């Protein structure tokens, strides 16, 4: 980690458990202190997480603050942004978009929640926060290896690998997928698993759209934390949850200066991988 003169403000969404919680634990143990803001959809769960972390906070030079945030609720997003403006002087340095959803029982509502939260709602939060990102700030999107183009059908690979992709076209594809879920026929264009598709769409957004929206020294990344033993990953996953925090913390620690070798790229195990 690089030393800083002032505390960098790091926002981690969906961090009351799992990989998000592990990221907070890891940041609190780093030699470089941060002003850490973590969010959770459920206020009680977030408050309990903060209590569990209290001993680590006491032994750390970092600050830790919890604020409720449900990224699927636009009013909750607006409330969070108003709080950032009031409490952090309308500025933050890193956003880790960790909040996500993966269906277990494959109900139609769970599939809709998956595409909405992992794609549409994540973009909504990101773009509403973007005006308050520091001039050398970072956006880190937690996606998945399952969203890589090699996991997608041939038609989807062609669509999402197009460098001329526009936000309008990408949102059309996401909307079409969401509409197909409602009708029960989402395979026509080559869509397969909704979770994989939602991450593929978010990867494409980061790669083609977000990277062009950033200015100056600002950077963005996608990253796969690995298949970890979390509530979402399941007890049979091969990796400890602490392992899932390694790459996002690595990306936070990279120099706050745009580097085109890394900007807009996809990371696994601290290394750049082909989309």
Image (cartoon, rainbow, N blue to C red):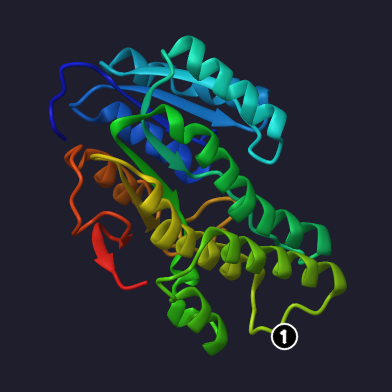
Residue 87 in view (yes/no): yes
Q: Position of residue 232 (x, y in %)?
A: 59, 54
Give above or below for 228 relative to 92: below
Give above or below for 100 relative to 275: above
Residue 7 relative to residue 72: left or right: left
Give me the residue at 33% from left, 46% from top.
248
Give me the residue at 35% from left, 53% from top.
221
User: Given the current orientation, which residue lies at the most extreme left position?
Assistant: 3
Element at badge 1?
loop
User: Given the current orientation, which residue lies at the most extreme right position?
Assistant: 183
Which quadrant, please, contains the C terminus? bottom left
The residue that mark 1 highlights is 188
Q: Residues within 10 Å of mark 1 (few under 14, many from 20)?
A: few
Give me the residue at 77% from left, 64% from top.
105
Count of marks overlaid on the render: 1
Residue 218 relative to residue 195: left or right: left
Q: Position of residue 65 (x, y in %)?
A: 46, 18
Residue 217, image quadrant: top left
Which quadrant, please, contains the N terminus? top left
């Amino acid at each position: 980690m690089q030393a800083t003169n002032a505390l960098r403000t790091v926002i981690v969404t969906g961090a009351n458990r799992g990989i998000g919680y592990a990221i907070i634990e890891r940041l609190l143990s780093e030699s470089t202190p941060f002003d850490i803001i973590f969010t959770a959809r459920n206020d009680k769960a977030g408050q309990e997480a903060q209590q569990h972390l209290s001993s680590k906070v006491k032994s750390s030079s970092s600050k830790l603050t919890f604020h409720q945030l449900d990224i699927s609720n636009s009013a909750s997003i607006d409330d969070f942004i108003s709080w950032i403006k009031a409490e952090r002087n309308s500025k933050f340095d890193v956003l880790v978009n960790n909040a996500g959803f993966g269906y277990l029982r494959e109900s139609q509502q769970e599939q809709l929640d998956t595409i909405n939260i992992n794609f549409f709602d994540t973009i909504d939060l990101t773009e509403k926060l973007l005006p308050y990102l520091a001039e050398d700030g970072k956006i880190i999107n937690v996606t998945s290896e399952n969203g890589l183009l090699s996991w997608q059908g041939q038609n989807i690979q062609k669509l999402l690998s197009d460098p001329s992709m526009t936000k309008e076209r990408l949102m059309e594809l996401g909307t079409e997928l969401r509409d197909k879920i409602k009708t029960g026929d989402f395979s026509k264009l080559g869509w397969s698993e909704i979770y994989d598709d939602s991450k593929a769409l978010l990867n494409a957004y980061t790669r083609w759209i977000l990277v062009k929206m950033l200015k100056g020294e600002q950077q963005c990344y996608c990253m796969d934390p690995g298949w970890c033993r979390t509530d979402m990953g399941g007890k049979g996953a091969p990796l400890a949850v602490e392992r899932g925090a390694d790459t996002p913390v690595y990306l936070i620690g990279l120099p706050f200066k745009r580097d085109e070798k890394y900007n807009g790229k996809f990371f696994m195990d601290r290394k750049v991988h082909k989309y």
